[in-house]
């Protein structure tokens, strides 16, 4: 794979013991060090115009001034320093690079993966939260719609936390499908199955909130029976994956049970799906706070595109998850077309 990366993203200093630290990117680089076919690209930063295409002007100006004045705690979890502004626009630029290269035809072993930080999927149109300042994947999706021939984008968010910012930004839009699989009942408290979009965007939001403890069989079933039918029906020109690795069974801040192989299965399913529907595909890093498992997850995504076939889970799907799947298949027109 081709990885978007910049040392600038390491300068976003969140302080001692903050889970979203520069060590995350260093761990990923270390994990990829001995892997075949890894290429790194330092993409241009995102312009303020590209960022304000999905965020309010006043908020972005306030954020820029906040960093210029030395930063501090935007909220108890979301921390910046003076250098954070450059990291923020670099991370958004890396995500936009990934979308651009995917649409230009980079596929297979050249599939792009942006590994910038800070992450983005909690950033709403007018505020920062949850370690996120600018919604990188939203900036990338909007830039693709504005600057290429792409007419529609689907965003698949497999981070353990609901991508509330991505949902909010595109909630009333019919040209962007936002599909999220996340742990129910944790931060930020959004992402219920009944949140399906509004106005022109009705049925363009798809949430699959899973009970704690779901692992490889549950995630594979959700993708096969909910996410993939919705993406295929939407038929986007571009699929962007908000790739958080904090649903891993060994991540310190979640209660889900995905394995590294499980992430490989999801990657393979998305790769095969986008091949069938002739959609471009790119990945954008979100969460993941156990350094070893974060690195292992990114390496697994790379290895799938390098020819590795992960084992398919064969255990039964938990009854609670079966009920969630059945409910969404019944209620969401993007999954099961109305009679």
Image (cartoon, rainbow, N blue to C red):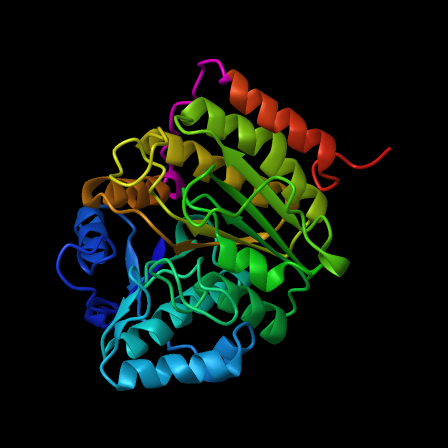
Q: Is residue 54 above or below residue 293?
A: below
Q: Please tell me whether residue 234 belongs to the stretch shown in magenta.
A: no
Q: Quadrant of residue 300?
A: top left
Q: Position of residue 26 (x, y in %)?
A: 18, 56
Q: Is residue 38 above or below residue 301?
A: below
Count numbered badges in the picture.
Answer: 0
Q: Residue at x 40, y 83 (%)?
A: 62
Residue furthest front in the image? 76
- Mostly what secondary structure, the magenta segment? loop
Q: Quadrant of residue 274?
A: top right
Closer-to-camera residue (220/279) = 220
Q: Residue at x 22, y 75 (%)?
A: 81
**Span highlighted in magenta in the image:** 304-318
Relative placement, left or right, of 74 versus 160 is left
Q: Is residue 275 visible?
A: no
Q: Position of residue 37 (x, y in %)?
A: 29, 51
Q: Is residue 213 above or below residue 303?
A: above
Q: Position of residue 319 (x, y in %)?
A: 53, 16
Q: Is residue 53 visible?
A: yes
Q: Position of residue 211 (x, y in %)?
A: 46, 29
Q: Residue at x 33, y 37 (%)?
A: 254
Q: Quadrant of the C terminus?
A: top right
Closer-to-camera residue (31/217) = 217
Q: Please tell me whether residue 313 belongs to the stretch shown in magenta.
A: yes
Relative placement, left or right, of 177 versus 182 is right
Relative placement, left or right, of 332 versus 23 is right
Closer-to-camera residue (2/45) = 45
Residue furthest left in the image? 16
């Amino acid at each position: 794979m081709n990885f978007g990366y910049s040392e600038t993203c390491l300068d976003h200093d969140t302080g001692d013991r903050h889970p979203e630290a520069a060590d995350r990117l260093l761990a990923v680089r270390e994990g990829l060090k001995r892997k075949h076919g890894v290429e790194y690209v330092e993409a241009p930063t995102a312009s303020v115009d590209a960022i304000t295409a999905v965020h309010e002007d006043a908020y972005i100006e306030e954020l820029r001034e906040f960093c210029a004045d030395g930063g501090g705690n935007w909220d108890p979890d979301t921390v910046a320093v003076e250098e954070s502004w450059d990291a923020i626009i670099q991370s958004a630029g890396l995500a936009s690079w990934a979308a651009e290269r995917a649409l230009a035809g980079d596929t297979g072993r050249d599939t792009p993966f942006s590994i910038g930080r800070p992450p983005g999927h909690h950033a709403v149109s007018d505020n920062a939260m949850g370690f996120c300042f600018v919604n990188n994947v939203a900036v990338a999706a909007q830039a693709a719609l504005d600057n290429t021939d792409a007419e529609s984008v689907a965003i698949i968010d497999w981070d353990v936390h609901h991508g509330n910012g991505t949902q909010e930004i595109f909630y009333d839009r019919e040209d962007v499908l936002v599909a999220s699989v996340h742990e129910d009942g944790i931060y930020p408290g959004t992402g219920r199955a009944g949140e399906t979009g509004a106005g022109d965007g009705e049925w363009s939001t798809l949430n699959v909130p899973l009970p704690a403890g779901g692992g490889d069989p549950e995630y594979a079933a959700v993708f096969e029976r909910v996410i993939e039918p919705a993406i295929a029906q939407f038929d986007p020109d571009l699929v962007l994956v908000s790739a958080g690795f904090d649903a891993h069974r060994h991540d310190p801040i979640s209660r889900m049970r995905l394995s590294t192989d499980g992430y490989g299965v999801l990657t393979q399913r998305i790769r095969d799906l986008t091949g069938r529907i002739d959609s471009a595909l790119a990945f954008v890093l979100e969460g993941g706070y156990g350094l070893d498992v974060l690195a292992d997850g990114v390496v697994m995504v790379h290895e799938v595109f390098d020819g590795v076939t992960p084992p398919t889970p064969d255990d039964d799907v938990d009854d609670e998850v079966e009920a969630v799947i059945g409910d969404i298949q019944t209620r969401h027109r993007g999954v099961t077309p109305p009679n």
